[in-house]
Image (spheres, grey):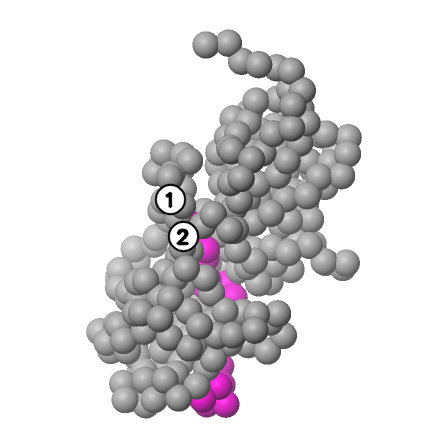
Amino acid sequence: MSVDLSNHRKRVAMVVQYLGTNFYGWQKQKQGRTVQGVIEATLTEVLGCTTKIHGAGRTDSGVHAAGQFAHFECESPIPGHKWSKILNDRLPDDIVIRASTEVEPNWHSQFSALWRRYRYTLYTHPTPNLFVQPLAWHYYQAPLDETLIQEAMTPLIGRHHLAAFHRSGSQRTHSWVEVQAAECSRRGSFIHIEIQASGFLYGMVRLLVGLLVDVGQGKRSLEDFKTIWSTERRDLVKYSAPARGLCLLRVGYPTALFPAHLWFDTQPTFLLSH
């Protein structure tokens, strides 16, 4: 099958990974290094014209992504699947395009998405580990019971008004969230908390994890936790977990654009008992 190399307006979708440590989040800002800003600048350099990208989610400063999706439009003879290599040859080391492909003109990385899934990682061993530090919250102050955390999370599944986990400064006018999955598991010294929903509130996962840690160490009962979120007591949610432990794990669409190994579960998990 021959490839049409004639110039035509095309929409290109990408799977994007980034280490959020040195970024002021995804969304382009007037000041500060952002993932969107860096990729747009690289595209503009290649194409010779200003090019805007759209992401499936807006991660905050310091938050990572293993399977962020994004798209852009261009008039270029370059086939969609070649953009990943072209961009990776020019992007800095803390951004990688896992794959790219041309999509239909009505496909949208944000509005076509059915769900997003985040993973939060806690490292619970009392001894620090330098290689774990950028990707996990080193929580050693008290033992955490992952079974209590799971019990607290389970009632969140469904459609709820989660204003208790909604930071100020958001442009969203309501706090309704359809939570599709809420899971907590332990691997050695690591606890992984995963939340899947159709969409997320500004700061939601980090505020949620901050309160779940209180449950896991027995400072708050399961009843207290449910009362706080069900009665929308934002004033009682005092602590936001550090950004470094949070990762946008993947985004789901009606039809998968790429093989699963390129986007489904590409954040490695540690397994250390010491």
- Residue 249: within the magenta? yes
Q: Is residue 168 above or below residue 118?
A: below
Is residue 190 in view? no
Q: Is residue 44 left or right of residue 185?
A: right
Which residue bears the numbered disc 2? Answer: 114
Q: Residue at x 55, y 59 (%)?
A: 59
State which quadrant residue 122 falls in: bottom left
State which quadrant residue 205 falls in: bottom left
The quadrant the C terminus occupies is: bottom left
Q: Is residue 253 above or below residue 99?
A: below
Q: Residue at x 67, y 20 (%)?
A: 7
Span colored in magenta: 233-251
Kind of residue at disc 2: Leu
Decide which of 199, 143 is in the foreground and name it. 199
Decide which of 273, 164 is in the foreground and name it. 164
The image shows residue 214 at horizontal and vertical percentages of: 36, 83
Q: Is residue 223 above or below residue 45?
A: below
Instruction: Find residue 215 and name its label.
Output: none
- Residue 72: within the magenta? no
Q: Disc 2 vs disc 1: Cβ atoms closer than 8 Å?
A: yes
Which residue bears the numbered disc 1? Answer: 254
The image shows residue 63 at horizontal and vertical percentages of: 53, 60
Q: Is residue 253 above or below residue 124?
A: above
**How many numbered tags mark residues here?**
2
